[in-house]
Amino acid sequence: MSFDLVVKGGTCVTASEMFEADIGIKDGRIAALGEGLNGEDVIDARGNLVMPGGIEAHAHIAQNSATGGMTADDYTSGSISAAYGGNTCIIPFAAQHRGMGVTETLDLYDSRAQGASVLDYSYHLIVSDPTEKVLTQELPAAFKRGITSFKLFMTYDKMLVNDAQFLDVLSVAKEHGALTMVHAENAGMIKWMTDRLLARGLTAPKYHALSHPALAEEEAIHRAICMAKLVDAPLLIVHVSTPEGAALVQNARDAGAKIYGETCPQYLFLTHEDMDKPGMDGAAFMCSPPLRDKATQDVLWQHIQVGTFDVVSSDHSPYRMDETGKLANGPDAPFTVIANGMPGIGARLPLLFSEGVGKSRLTLPDFVALSSTNAARLYGLLPQKGTLAIGADADIAIWDPAAKGVISTNNQHDNAGYSPFEGWKVTGLPITTLSRGTRVVDRGQLYAKAGHGQFLPRAKFDATGRKGTHLPELDIAR
């Protein structure tokens, strides 16, 4: 049999094993794993690693904030940056704002993504206005559309839901087989701290970190887990940034609850000291939850190693350092009106590989699990994505484990205009990314065009392996 493309002679790595093999690709899918395969086109992967392409499942692309600001990347620039970073699939957010319907929201994001992305894509639906119509009609309709993950906020005045609304969405998600995600920070604690900082005239970007104390995350994660346990619904705690929050996720997992966890590179590689810069320079490092400290980094790495976190995602939220982005409210704006978020979609995997695999914190299969396979499993894409198996989409990243590079604004290919990881030296880089067997990036050259990426309707969430929780009170309340 002759194949359209053969990836020849590489070391194949999945989330569970490593083996030497040729990969034969036909009609965009993996058709064979073997030796001596021949094809019309051949990529020589000898001496390199052949892995499932990364799945970036936490990114804000072509997204309006609740205050009206637009992220710097559209689906073209965001997906190109992701592809250069070894990713072959993205799942950004579609944000419902107050007064918007869910169907209206998804139609809007379809109009922004269709014909624009170079990678296959889906959305997580942010729910900020869970009206009766949303709960009974529009969320079920979104699920039928293939949107099987919803996100809630426990902070931000224009986005947060109250506890009763949280339980309503969890219940609907459970009924239809969707996964709920949550940004867990206590809004009251943050407001209380913020008011006191402003009263003292402490408005510089560095005070953003003080306004979001670690305890605000700990309390909210505890409350979110309790609500998920009440209705026995799966819940993913996103961007965990504290040892206490990670411990809560770990304890819930160990007890069999359907709780899942995510952290991000900024919490592993940056600290709040990066925000302590002259003028507005520190605003480049403002994100929520905020950057913590070196001791926290060490603990989060330990949690990655023991399996507390299912995924390490970028939380790519790019705002330029100008009047279109972080400085929209002026060059001397207080931290309260500076857009939160930083770019990182292209840096995620090189950093994780270099600092994880390269420093013996992670095995290669661990890296694949954290970067691709676990996301595919959580978000209803396995086995179509996230693995090297016959029948799977030929979404493949070829890595040179010895290649050395330096992360800089010039090689990130996004529209943010800066990188918070500027100057980081990395060892191990993706040299080729294939989307459904088509070259997207190969040795620094972009091949795929806008519109190559297709929308991915996703399967329902599978919580197999977790015993869950059963509260007798809920039996009576049903």
Image (tube, helix red, strand yellow):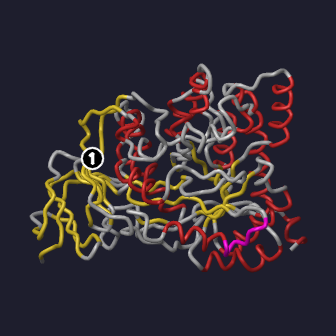
Residue 155 visible in rendering: yes
Numbered disc 1: secondary structure:
strand
Residue 165 picture location, percent across and down: 83, 62
**Where does the magenta region start and end?**
99-104
User: What residue does disc 1 label?
Assistant: 399
175 shown above or below 158: below
Q: Nearer the viewer, residue 4 or 406?
A: 406
Q: Amino acid at mark 1?
A: Trp
Residue 88 picture location, percent across and down: 38, 59
Residue 302 visible in rendering: no
Q: Residues within 10 Å of mark 1 (few under 14, many from 20)?
A: many
56 shown above or below 301: below
The quadrant the N terminus occupies is bottom left
Residue located 64% across and 72% down the image = 177
Q: Is residue 427 left or right of residue 456?
A: left
212 shown above or below 114: above
Residue 279 picture location, percent across and down: 62, 22
Residue 266 picture location, percent across and down: 54, 36
